[in-house]
Every structure is written in C-alpha cells, then in structure tokens.
Image (cartoon, grey):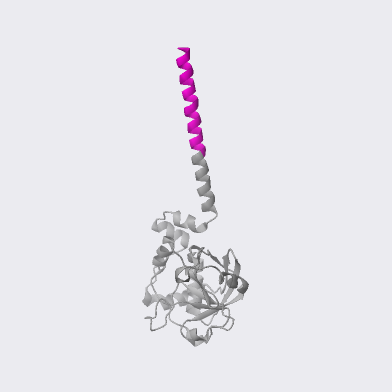
Amino acid sequence: MRYSLSIIAGFLILFFASCEDKNSSQKSAAETVAEKMENDSTAIEVAKDYTEEEKIEEKGLGEAYPIPQEELIPFLTQYGKENPENRVRIVTSFGDIEVTLFRDTPLHRANFIMLVKNGYFDNTYFHRVAPGFVIQGGNSDNEATYEMRQDVGNYLIPSEFAAGHRHTYGAFSAAKYSEQNVSKASSPFEFFIVVDKGGSPHLNNDHTVFGEVTSGMDVAEKIAQVETGQSEWPIDNIYMDVEIIE
C-alpha cells in the first residue's frame, strides 16, 4: 500500500510539474505576443475586430462617410473652413519629417488633414522607394488600410495645378491611380516626396504639389536608400504615424 501511495504521489508531482511548465510556456508565448503587439501599433490595429460603430467612434467618422464623388468638393471646402491646420509631422523609425501644406491647394490640404485626424496614415508605410527620385507613402498590405479606404470613400480629388507649385526638391505631391485617369485627379490616400535634388519637372501639371517638406529631408534621404523588392516596395516595412503640428 505504501509503495502504491508513493507511486501515486510521484505521479501527482510529475503531473503538476508538467502543468506548471506548460502554463509557464504558455505565459511566455503570450507575453511575447503582447510585447510584439505593444511595439507595433499596426499589428494592434489589424488584430482588433471592430464593429462598424466602434470604427466610427474611434476614427471620428460620421454620417457623411463614405464621401460620394459628387459631394466631394462642397464637403472638403466646408471641412477646410472648419479645420484650418496646415502643418503635419510624419513620424518614422528613421526620424521625423515635417510638412507644410499649401493653402492655395485647399481640396488637397483639407483631404490630407481629414485623413490625419481620422488616423488613416497610422496604418500605412512608405511603400515605394525610388532612389534619387521619390519616396511614396500612404499604402500598406494590411486589411485595416483597405477597410479604412472603404469607410472614407472611393473618390478622386480634382487637380489643383492653378496654384503653380512645382516638383522641386522636397515637394510634397499627390499620387495618381493610373494613366487612364485623363483628368489627372489625385489619389486621396497616397503622397510622395521628391528626393531628386534637381527636382522632377516632368511631373509638373501631371501631379498636384500641395505642400513642401520644411524639416527632415535628411530623413527622407535615408528612407530613399533602403533595400527594395518588387515594385520598389521596401524589404522591411517603413511604418509611419502622422500627426497635426498646427
């Protein structure tokens, strides 16, 4: 009987030790995931299972969204009057880039400020790097980016070439979706910074320049040197957060 009890006691000790090791292992794995998500705001955003109500509440979207193309100009005109900010900061692991948005390109300025205030860019990367030419941002391969675009609206911004801004070094300009876009209207979500010190005059009157880098071109130059893969997409994603300065 004593022998049997010893066997049973030994078995229980091994069982609980095994459970303790297993729980310790699970805790370690959980801690690892938590740390990774804590250090990666994009992972946190994608991991959340938002309801439509939570999206609207967190992103500040209201009944006006998604914005129909036919209502875009009056919407952005009014939004621009109510939100006069024109200085933003792009935060990356390489450093900060500060941009002043031009007031004489009011639709582009208002659209960009709206996206910043709704947190759109905080899910995106500098996703295209062309050394000696441009670095382009505002896209990602995250589902959250696609969903946010659908929430905001599938529209194009009319070009604002009349302002006369040129693609000089440090120009902040709007990307376009395709060559079939005969009106040369802008993508509402993607932008690029000219890193060619001689400028890129062939882009004038083809893309709308709606701002300029006022600080951080050294950061833009560093980003322009990263290793890329297909479609000039960086091998390592270059995350960004964009915030209003004033």
Choose between 21 and 170: the one closer to the eye: 21
Q: Decide if residue 76 is in sight here.
A: yes
Q: Quadrant of the N terminus?
A: top left
What residue sits 58% from the left and 74% below the top?
99
Question: Where, by quadrant of the figure, is residue 4 drawn?
Answer: top left
Q: Is residue 38 above or below residue 140?
A: above
Q: Residue at x 48, y 13 (%)?
A: 2
Vertical order, 181 against 8 (above or below):
below
Residue 232 spot, x, y in % from top left = 48, 71
Relative to the observer, which residue lies in front, 241 or 17? 17
Residue 157 in the magenta stretch? The answer is: no
Task: Say left or right for 14 vs 51.
Answer: right
Q: Nearer the viewer, residue 96 or 76?
A: 96
Q: How many numbered tags mark residues here?
A: 0
Q: Quadrant of the C terminus?
A: bottom right
Identify the residue at the far top of this view.
1
Instruction: Please say whether residue 10 is one of the residues in the magenta stretch.
Output: yes
Q: Position of residue 143 (x, y in %)?
A: 41, 61
State whether residue 62 appears in this view: no
Q: Which residues are magenta?
A: 1-24
**x and y, in percent, of residue 149 in the image:** 41, 67
Residue at 57 percent across and 66 percent down: it is: 91
